[in-house]
Amino acid sequence: MMEGSASGSLPLDMRSDMEVCMSDRLVPSRGTCGQVSQMKLDRDENWAPRNEYHEVLSQNVLGKESLANVKVLSYKHKPQRQEVGQNDLRVLYSCNRDGSAKSRPKTERVVPQSALKVLDAPGLLDDFYSHPVDWSPRNVVAVALSETVFLFDAASGKTEKLLTLSAGAVTTLRWTGEGIHLSVGTSLGEVQIWDGSEQRQVRSLRGHGGRVGSLAWHDHMLSSGAADAEIHQHDVRARDHLAARLTGAHTDLVCGLDYSSDGVLASGGNDNVVCIWQNALQREPQHTLTEHRAAVKAVRWCPWQRNVLATGGGKGGRPGG
C-alpha cells in the first residue's frame, strides 16, 4: 500500500520545480517586457527575492527595479487617472491614441510661373473646332500650323517638319497609344497616317464628306468624326479600312472623340450631345447625354477610374462628368 501510494504521487523534487518555476512559454510578445522583466523568463534562475537579504541584494544589483516589483507583462500606454466628473469614454480614447494628433504634411503641386519653352507658331488656326496640338507618350509634341505639321522633341529640344499638305489645312492631330504613328485630319475630309520616327506617310483614308473634326485610337482601330455628322471606324490593318459608319447619333460636326482603356468610345458634337458607344462596331449609342448647352469638344476618360468621363462645352456651356 505504501509503495502504491508512493508510485501514484509525484516526486517531491518535481513538485517543487513546478511550484517555483517562473518561466512562461505562452507569453505572446516579448516586446512589452523590460530588461529586468525578461530575467524572470529564464528557467531555474533569477528567482524573486525570498528574504530581506535577497531583496537588498537585488536592489543593489538592479537598482530600484528589483525582481520582486517588476511584472513580466506591462502595458506601454497606461491609463490616466480619472478625475471627478470626467467622462469614461474620454479616458479610453486618450489611452488608445498614439500620442498627440500628427498633422500630415500637405503635398502641394508647384505650378511654374514661367514657360519652360516657348515655340513660335505662325499660321496656328484660330478655330475652336480644331485640335492642332497633341503630345505623344514618347514626349514628342505634334503641332499643326495651317497646312504644315511640326514635331518638337521635348527631351532634346529639336524641332522637325513632318509634312506639308498640297491642299487644304490640318484640322486635328492624334498620336497612337505607343506614340509612333500620328493620325492627321484635314479640312478636305481626308485622314492620313504618318510614321513619326521614319517621317513618312503610311496610309491615306478617305470617306468623309466634310472636314475632319476629331480622331481617336484604340489598338488597331482609328475613329474619325467629321462635319458630315458621321463617325467612321477604320481598321488600319485591312486594305478595306472602313469597318463601320456610325450615323444618326449626331446631327452636326463631331468635334470630340476618346476611347477608354476598355474600348468604350465617347463622342461629342456641335449639336451639344455626348454619345457613349460600348465598342467601335456598335451601331447605336448605349447612352446619350444632352445636358450641355454648347458644342462638346473636350471629351476625356479618366485614366484611373474607368467609368468616369469628363466633358467640356464651348461658350455658354458647362462642364460635365
Image (cartoon, helix red, strand yellow):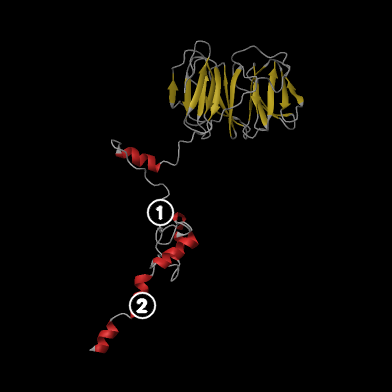
Quarter residue 176 falls in: top right
Asked if residue 202 is positioned above or below residue 317 in the image, the reply reads below
Helix, strand or loop under label 2: helix
Residue 192 is left or right of residue 5, and the answer is: right
| Circle 2 Cα neighbour tier, 10 Å, few/some/many (<14 / 14–19 / ≥20) | few
Q: Are marks 2 and 1 in contact (CB under 8 Å)?
A: no
Please tell me which residue is depicted at 72% across the width and 25% down the height of the picture.
151
Say which amino acid is labelled 1: Ser
Please tell me which residue is depicted at 53% across the width and 11% down the height of the picture.
315
Depth order, front residue of 294/65: 65
Q: Position of residue 238 (x, y in %)?
A: 62, 34
Decide which of tag 2 and tag 1 comes sooner along the chain. 2
Instruction: State the CA–CA distance, disc 2 to disc 1.
Output: 30 Å
Numbered mark located on residue 74 in the image: 1
Quarter residue 46 falls in: bottom left
Q: Position of residue 59 (x, y in %)?
A: 46, 61
| Circle 1 Cα neighbour tier, 10 Å, few/some/many (<14 / 14–19 / ≥20) | few
Asked if residue 131 is positioned above or below residue 49 in the image, the reply reads above
Q: Which residue is mark 2?
A: 14
Residue 52 is left or right of residue 86, and the answer is: right
Asked if residue 43 is positioned above or below residue 245 in the image, the reply reads below
Say which amino acid is labelled 2: Met
Q: Position of residue 180 (x, y in %)?
A: 68, 33
Quarter residue 72 falls in: bottom left
How many marks do you count on the picture?
A: 2
Depth order, front residue of 160/10: 10
Q: Looking at the image, can residue 241 be seen? A: yes
Numbered mark located on residue 299 in the image: none
Q: Looking at the image, can residue 244 be seen? A: no
Depth order, front residue of 57/83: 57
Q: Position of residue 307 (x, y in %)?
A: 47, 31
Depth order, front residue of 233/292: 292
